[in-house]
Image: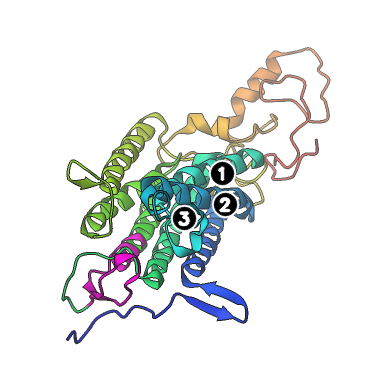
Amino acid sequence: MELAYIPSPSHGVVYLGPLPLRGYAFCIIIGVFVAVWLGNKRWVARGGRSGTVADIAVWAVPFGLVGGRLYHVITDYELYFGEGRDWVNAFKVWEGGLGIWGAIALGGLGAWIGARRRGVPMPAYADAVAPGIAFAQALGRWGNWFNQELYGRETHVPWALHITSTTDGRVPGYYHPTFLYESLWCVGVGFLVIWADRRFKLGHGRAFALYVAAYCLGRGWIEYMRVDDAHHILGLRLNDWTALLVFLLAVAYIWISAKKRPGRELQVERGLPAEGETAAGADTGGTGRTASAPDGAADRAEKDTPDDAAGPVDGPAGKAGDADAKADPGPRDAGPGGADEDGAAGAPAEAGVKDEAGTAKKG
């Protein structure tokens, strides 16, 4: 007799009148809300608009659910197709069966569509939502507890999971709670990404890649402990090979991206102040430019932020512009937007872009 163990729920559905409230679906929904909430806070801190993350999630979440289900059905097709199986069950998502690999892949496609519609750089968006996705996975794994599924080998540790169901060939007993192991690992991954992003100012998708690499490390050893049926290749479960491949790709992306595009995006949405600026249009030393990335990537500041209107600027940064202006004796017609940085007749300034004094120009 076990003196200590984690009990399993007797059922995974609670009925509110005729409406069924399924534990698995409830965990997924709560996870989505947490991911969107935290992603929005991080996006606003990066200089984005509140609500952008939720707008893009409207595309990402449905795509992710479809992708997760497709991966599960394709890799475990024998559960739904063949003699004695009902293919209709492939559509019963509430009974469990979402592959994270397919959810991230197709969910990423949905996010890319939403990001393009909003004019938002996809890598910056992915960095903002990365820790929230990890926390969402941590919550979602408790859906496996409600369904009494995806547990590990038999054990007698004090935190063993007591399985009581005999559905689909389950054998009642005490097993490693791999759902709990993965849930705790995902919480750690989420905090790791938050810390690393603050410490190293990760950008251009590297925070998301760190989340992917860290998750794959944990998923590898947790997957190895599971005893549910799975396809094996060279003695390893299919998901172990997937975790290894995705881990290598994520690490390679971090290394290559850091070499080619150091630092991170200074501005994530057009017409808004860059990260660390105030709405008054703070700049650095009167140069009229936003602060450069911590790595000194000043060459990207001109690409990521709108050009300020040229004009006399006090201090050393304004001398070159003054000299150019004096060298041209001919009169110029200044358009509504003023002169540009080269002294050419100004095109109308983009609405919402702030000039050096912090006031908004009108287009």
Query: Which span of residues is magenta-colored?
Result: 159-186
Q: Position of residue 33 (x, y in %)?
A: 54, 63
Q: Earlier in the sequence, mark 3 or mark 1?
A: 3
User: In the figure, 359 relative to 152: above or below?
Assistant: above
- The disc placed on residue 153 is none
Disc 2: CA contacts within 10 A as few (<14), some (14-19) or many (>=20): some
Residue shown at the point (51%, 47%) measured from the top left: 107
Q: From the image, which quarter does the N terminus lie in?
A: bottom left
As drawn, the residue found furthest toward the front would be 83
Q: Earlier in the sequence, mark 3 or mark 2?
A: 2
- The disc placed on residue 62 is 2
The amino acid sitting under disc 1 is Gly
Mark 1 lies on a secondary structure that is: helix
Asked if the residues shown at circle 2 and circle 1 are in contact, with their CB atoms under 8 angstroms apart, the answer is yes
The amino acid sitting under disc 3 is Asp
Residue shown at the point (47%, 51%) measured from the top left: 69
The residue nearer to you, when weighing 24 against 363, is 24
- Pointer 3: what residue? 86
Q: CA distance from mark 3 to mark 2?
A: 24 Å
- Pointer 1: what residue? 110
Say if the magenta span includes residue 172.
yes
Colouring scheme, one of rainbow, by chain, secondary structure, one colour: rainbow
Mark 2 lies on a secondary structure that is: helix
In this rendering, would 25 be left or right of 213? Answer: right
Q: From the image, which quarter does the C terminus lie in?
A: top right
Q: CA distance from mark 3 to mark 1?
A: 30 Å
